[in-house]
Image (cartoon, helix red, strand yellow):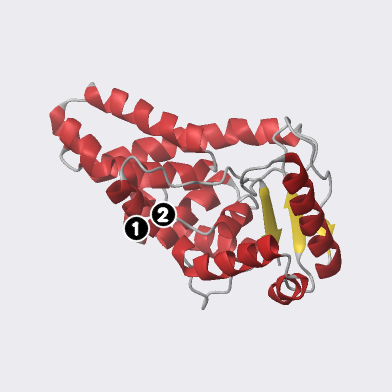
Amino acid sequence: MEELYGQYRALLFTLAYQLTGSIADAEDAVQDVFVKAYRVHPERLEEPKAYLCKMVTNHCLNLQKSARKKRETYVGPWLPEPFRTPETDPLEMTVIRRDLLTYAMLVLLERLTPTERTVFVLRETLGFDYLEIAELLGKQEANCRKLLSRARSKMGISEEETVAAEAVELEWVNRFLASLEQGNVEHVMSLLSEDVKFVAYGGGKAKAFRHPVQTREHVARVLFDGIQSLRRRFSGGFLLRGCSFEQ
């Protein structure tokens, strides 16, 4: 079991995090699955990848349904938890980062039903074929294809578009953050779409905008006001998190 844990932990965490949008929930899902797998007869683990992925998928589907009810009572927009790379195991984190969706994609996943989200993640980020997905979910291949098509439509992604991994947009993010830190208003404005939408999330613990901020000018003003406020409050560095941009 220790060998299986080392071999599949990164894959299962990547799957669970993108299904739940929560690091804590993803870690709990992986731990729970391996505890249960420890009691499974070895004959049932002849194909461990498929078996473990199915267990994680079922765990997350159940969690999504209960989490969705909680979010319906939350005032304001809800955002996934940002993933920051720990320094404890750089090799494993490299594997995880390779298959992670961009944060913007994670926000778009919130438009989907739990089953649509599961099909999208399995197919577009982890490269499962439709037969594997159908077996994991107990559905027909044709049904899974329809679920993926519906998911793409809800997310505004055409059939021809390729879903980018997180690393693809890293250059844009670095340029954007550098411009914010330098106070370069013109460059920040040039990097924002005219119909950009700023969504803030306080997690029920911090103050945040209850409604999205729209238009390039308003979003830029909010960002620079926020940076100035943080600089006044902290003499050291700070991390800008808990917000997202949508086009």
Residue at image location 39% in from the left, 42% down from the top: 13
Asked if the residue at tag 2 contacts the one at tag 1, i.e. Cβ–Cβ closer than 8 Å, the answer is yes
> Farthest residue in the front direction?
235
Q: Quarter holding the C terminus?
A: bottom right
Left or right: 2 as drawn, with respect to 9: left
Residue 214 percent coordinates (x, y)? 83, 62
Q: Is residue 35 above or below residue 60?
A: above
Query: Where is mark 2, residue-wise?
Result: 122
Instruction: Identify residue type, mark 1.
Output: Phe
Mark nearer the N terminus (1 vs 2): 2
| Image quadrant occupied by the N terminus | top left
Q: Callout 1: few (<14), some (14-19), or many (20+) C-alpha neighbours within 10 Å?
A: some
Toward the top, the furthest residue is: 39
Instruction: Quadrant for residue 223, please give it.
Output: bottom right
Q: Name the residue under label 1.
A: 128
Query: How far separated are the C-alphas under marks 1 and 2?
Result: 6 Å
Residue 137 visible, this angle? no
